[in-house]
Image (cartoon, rainbow, N blue to C red):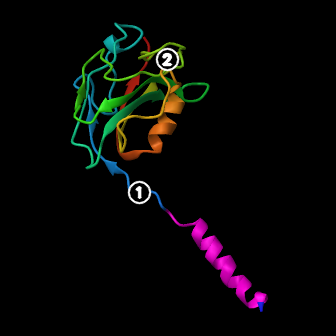
Amino acid sequence: MWRSFAPALWLAATAACGTRTDKAVAQFNLSSSAFQNGGAIPGEFTCDGGGKSPPLSWSEPPPGTKSFALVVDDPSAPNGTFGHWGVWDIPASTRMIGSGQAPGPQSKNDFGKLGYGAPCPPNGSHHYRFKLFALDTEKLDVSSGAKFQDLEGAAEKHVLGRAELVGTYQRH
């Protein structure tokens, strides 16, 4: 008798494993008045200039957004993705971050310092991703000074929407 139920049980178990319970992630727009998406980041926002973060602004996020988190990284770094900045618990009413500002707690960058670590590639042209997450929570469970990877992992658990801006930089 159990033999006749075994295939049905196996099918039910494997079907449940493949069920997606993830919610859809909406897209919205992130931009900077300092550079275009895919364009060069001006020197003033790099280690060769003032080293301040560039100004950022974004469009209306998805409904239900309670806060934002921002992660900036360089996936073209020689030893793997390099973290340049992380900010979280950005209020839902915020639609811009001024140059050099941090509207929330900041992560430790891969330079080993808290806050924005300006692009400073050792060689060649690098791509810097500014990733903004619209979140379904007002506060992320992230410790002050956490690494950017911990911030991004916590944000992924609460993401309603995401926006991305990419800039390039090559030292001269």
* Residue at 73 percent of width and 83 percent of height: 6
Q: Which mark is residue 23?
A: 1
The image shows residue 12, relative to residue 43, as above or below, that is below
Q: Position of residue 18 (x, y in %)?
A: 57, 66
Direction from residue 24 to residue 3 in the image, left or right: right
The image shows residue 90, relative to residue 102, as above or below, that is below
Crowd band around label 2 with a 10 angstrom C-alpha radius: few (<14), some (14–19), many (20+): some
Q: Secondary structure at mark 1?
A: loop
Q: Secondary structure at mark 2?
A: loop
Q: Position of residue 156 (x, y in %)?
A: 46, 43
Residue 39 part of the magenta segment: no
| Residue type of the residue flagged with mark 1 | Lys
Q: What span is colored magenta in the figure?
A: 2-20
Q: Earlier in the sequence, mark 1 or mark 2?
A: 1
* Residue 129 seen in render: no
| Residue type of the residue flagged with mark 2 | Pro
* Residue at 50 percent of width and 25 percent of height: 143
Hey, which quadrant is residue 46 in on the image? top left
Direction from residue 15 to residue 65 in the image, left or right: left
Residue that label 2 marks: 121
Crowd band around label 1 with a 10 angstrom C-alpha radius: few (<14), some (14–19), many (20+): few
The image shows residue 1, relative to residue 102, as above or below, that is below
